[in-house]
Amino acid sequence: MALLSFLLVVFLFSSKSDAQGPPSPGYYPSSRIRSIGFNQGFRSRWGSQHQSLDQNSLTIWLDRSSGSGFKSINSYKSGYFGVAMKLQPGYTAGVITCFYLSNNEAYPGDHDEIDLEFLGTTPGKPYTLQTNVWMKGSGDGSTVTGREMKFRLWFDPTKDFHNYAILWNPSEIIFFVDDVPIRTYARKSDETFPLKPMWAYGSIWDASSWATEGGKYKADYRYEPFVGKYNNFKIAGCGVSAPASCRPASASPARTGGLSQQQYAAMAWVQNNYKVYDYCRDSSRDHKHTPEC
């Protein structure tokens, strides 16, 4: 009986903790960066006929004829790049709704990329948020090498807008969800870190071959259009012509940058409870291509 009582207490505490969300990170980078209108920082990149802008809230959609995407006007050497997103409920298998940094157009075949990608799903199953880091086109110059870390979320991203951000500075990359850091990626060597200037992008597109349970479920256009909504755009970065004294936005209250102990505690909570894949812990991967692991 004592054991059952103990297990009940643990269950109730865990459920209460999950309902409340992660511990406070204590510092909120997004609150220190002003929002900009979509047209102040971005332009349509493709599928403009599948975009609608209403008071700086952008809706993009995918149907059987086309997806859609947008791109920042300027490129950056470092910075904070954030947006609020609301996803479509129901059947969205095979569909990617994303916000990311890339220089693919400037360096085809040798590009860098930092991704926040929502992998579409089937009814009753949660979305997966995939974070990823690429450099030099494929990771090592010859073999396609992603650095994926995947998460479920402690809320339903279809119910409301939530803030998602990438902070990229010369020493590390930090991914944020509602100002809670969920992943860091350190610069351990120049070979395993994106260094070339990048643009910020957002898009919705068909990735049926891999997006949902390894491609098991495909985009089903009986459910079209698939819609992604974006607002609260934020860019605070050092452009390519910025002086050497330019410093990107800080991730924490510390002058030296990096995360505070409170932020690390919040990130640990997320990773312990909601991380579902880590490339460094995947025994099927050839880790000679990911020396940072």
Image (cartoon, rainbow, N blue to C red):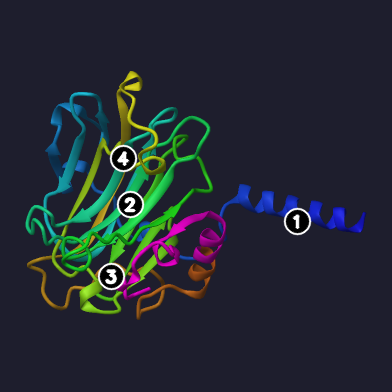
Dot 3: element: helix
Occupied quadrant, residue 269: bottom right
Q: How far apart are labels 2 and 3 at the CA level?
A: 22 Å
Quick check: 62 above or below 4?
A: above
Q: Is residue 33 in view from this perspective?
A: yes
Tag 4 or tag 2, which sits nearer the N-term? 4
- Residue position marked by numbered label 3 in the rendering: 289
Please give the name of the residue rendered at 51% of the width and 61% of the height, measured from the top-left corner: 271
Q: Are marks 2 and 4 in contact (CB under 8 Å)?
A: no
Q: Position of residue 2 (x, y in %)?
A: 91, 58
Amino acid type assigned to the residue bearing label 1 in the image: Val
The answer to the question of whether label 3 and label 4 lie on touching residues, with beta carbons closer than 8 A, is no
Q: Is residue 271 magenta?
A: yes
* Residue 50 placement (x, y as % from top left): 19, 28
Q: What's the distance in space between the residues labelled 2 and 1, CA to CA? A: 33 Å
Q: Circle 2 is placed at which residue position?
A: 116
Pointers 2 and 3 in contact (C-beta within 8 Å) = no
